[in-house]
Amino acid sequence: MPKAAPHLLTEAPLEACERCVRVISAGEPWGVAGIPDPRAALFWGKAMATSFLVLGTLVLVAAGCAAWLFRRRGRSPGRVSGTNAASRVDASGTVDAVAQDGYAPAGEIPVSTDLLPDALPHRLYALAFEQPMLARPPAAPGSAHAEVAAAAADLLSRIDTQRRYTPRRPLLLPQLMRTINDPSASAQAIAAIIGQDPALAANLLRIAGSPLYRVQSKPVDSIDRAVAMVGTDGLRQIISAALVQPVMGSGSGAFAGFPGTMWEHALMSAVAAADHAKLVERGDAFAAQLGGLLQGLAAIIVVQVVRDQYAKRPGVAPQVGVAVALLDRWTDPVARRIAAKWELSDAIAQALAEQGAAAPKQGALARSLCFGRSAATLAMLCARDAVAEHDALQALHLIEGRGGTAVDGIWRRLRREVDAQEAG
């Protein structure tokens, strides 16, 4: 009686399969008179079970890959900056909002493109110039408006030498910067330095008592009380605001309301940038605070220069479009020149250079500045009923898809401030 294939019940499945092939190729039967050997049947059962197990695993892997690819087709990656937002704009002029995990399900909660970083500065300028819409007709060559634009651009290119416009570096700035950047420095040490400058101390108390910083209803009437209320981190932010606050000149005409609105925006932008740097980027919140304030200060300087150039031409009515064109071109360069004149850090200068659509890539500090400016603009638009709060918050999560609850907390803080400003 022919022998059945040996060891089939004790061998591993792959070894058993190899032995099966050798037996069949050798023509050795596994049974007699067509009656199968029981051990051979057990072998085939074992081999088939192994095959089904492998096949089932392959099917599960293939299904998982298909599901992953399907999800990828309906999702777009995380944050959207001003330079890449257009790639996600559909034919109706909307863009998919980003969820808190940094991705956006396609077609859900569309956000208008005029709430993205490239468009928001002009929405802000429309508020500051009290214009429902901004038009930027090019100044005809040789016209009085073209002369104003050229003269203003020439002055702005050397603004760091113009004492009339560029604030002097505060005398206490080097000492304050060293103390503020010292992790072991106490709030009392910072307050002692501030106390040497009565004007700075008065400005500090005024800012500490504003809704943006005040945490109690009782007035802030002393530096020591301000220190106790806001702590060292809050005091650092307040100091930077007090140091660079420009002198608001009184005036009339098309540009009269611009300085006040822009400085209100700068304070909120700086706070939002500092919070973003601390909570999202895990970076230098104080540098973000100063950078945001310098951007607002630079915008005010640009418009002051344009206003004065028009004042030299009494017969020419100021044109907002000329000011807007110069704001687009010169705000960040002027901020960089002030930073260099004040000998601020290279990181701040670099972050200011990385603003705008022309920047190929933004670092952490530059992202915080962009976020702060966008967040403050959206908060002001909401307060004036120009944008629904739901849409504004969705746009903010689109601009910064990594923040999650941190973005929500920054937004609530800005809304408290802007609502208080509007009520006052």
Image (cartoon, rainbow, N blue to C red):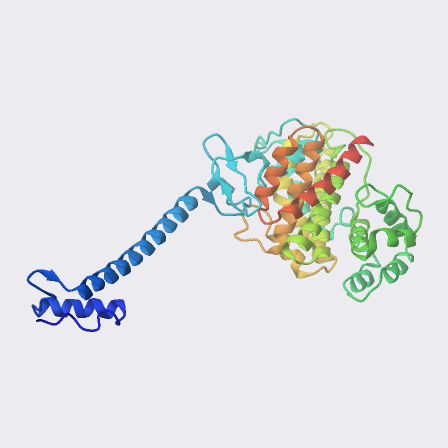
Tell me where residue 340 sits by quadrant. bottom right
In this figure, what is the number of numbered marks? 0
Residue 73 or residue 227, whichever sits in front = 73
Residue 132 or residue 152, whichever sits in front = 132
Residue 354 or residue 386, whichever sits in front = 386
Query: Where does residue 61 sit, x and y in percent of width and height?
Result: 36, 54
Point 75% across, 57% down: residue: 342
Tell me where residue 306 sits by quadrant. top right
Point 81% across, 64% down: residue: 179
Residue 15 or residue 69, whichever sits in front = 15
Point 66% across, 42% down: residue: 375
Answer left or right for 116 relative to 273.
left
The image quadrant where one finds the N terminus is bottom left
Query: Where does residue 322 sit, x and y in percent of width and height?
Result: 64, 34
Query: Where does residue 86 sit, x and y in percent of width and height?
Result: 49, 40
Point 73% across, 53% down: residue: 290
Query: Where does residue 372 sit, x and y in percent of width and height?
Result: 67, 46
Answer left or right for 180 relative to 70.
right
The image quadrant where one finds the C terminus is top right
The answer, for residue 147, to whether it is visible in the render is no
The answer, for residue 213, to whether it is visible in the render is yes
Answer left or right for 348 relative to 225.
left
Q: Is residue 107 above or below residue 153?
A: above
Q: Is residue 91 above or below residue 190?
A: above
Answer left or right for 4 relative to 407.
left
